[in-house]
Image (cartoon, rainbow, N blue to C red):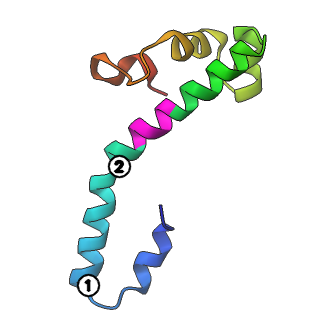
Amino acid sequence: MADIDDIDNIADPAERAKEVGRRLNAIPAWNALLREKRQAILREMKAAGMSYAEIGRAVGMHRNRAQKIIEGPASGGQGGKADEA
């Protein structure tokens, strides 16, 4: 995703507003993609033999949070609650 500051370079206010709208509309898709990527990375760390505590320390979260993300549904399921943070 392009930098947010580049929006300020759009001279026409209407076009600036449209661009902001496009980016806001893209947030849910980006959010889901980033959650899936994070889960895949944490699963990779677990598969490499790291404990939940080690993973948590490495990425700056509690071990229970790391476990919840690793074991949760990849899509975030149930309103995304299983993979929030």
Task: Indicate left or right for 10 with 64 as reference.
Answer: left
Residue that carries the numbered disc 1 in the rendered image: 13
Q: Which amino acid does label 1 sit on?
A: Pro
Secondary structure beneath dot 1 equals helix
Within 10 Å of the Cα at label 1, are there few (<14), some (14-19), or many (20+) other Cα atoms? few
- In contact (CB < 8 Å): disc 2 and disc 1: no
Give how far apart the Cα atoms at labels 2 and 1 are: 21 Å
Q: In this view, does 53 lie to the left or right of 80?
A: right
Q: What stretch is highlighted in magenta?
A: 31-36
Left or right of 18? Residue 80 is right
Residue in the image at 77% along x and 16% along y: 48
Q: Residue 79 carries which label?
A: none
Question: Could you say where residue 40 lies in the image, as x and y percent from the top left?
Answer: 58, 26
Image-based side of 43 in relation to 28, left or right: right
Which residue occupies 31% across, 67% down? 20
Mark drawn on residue 27: 2
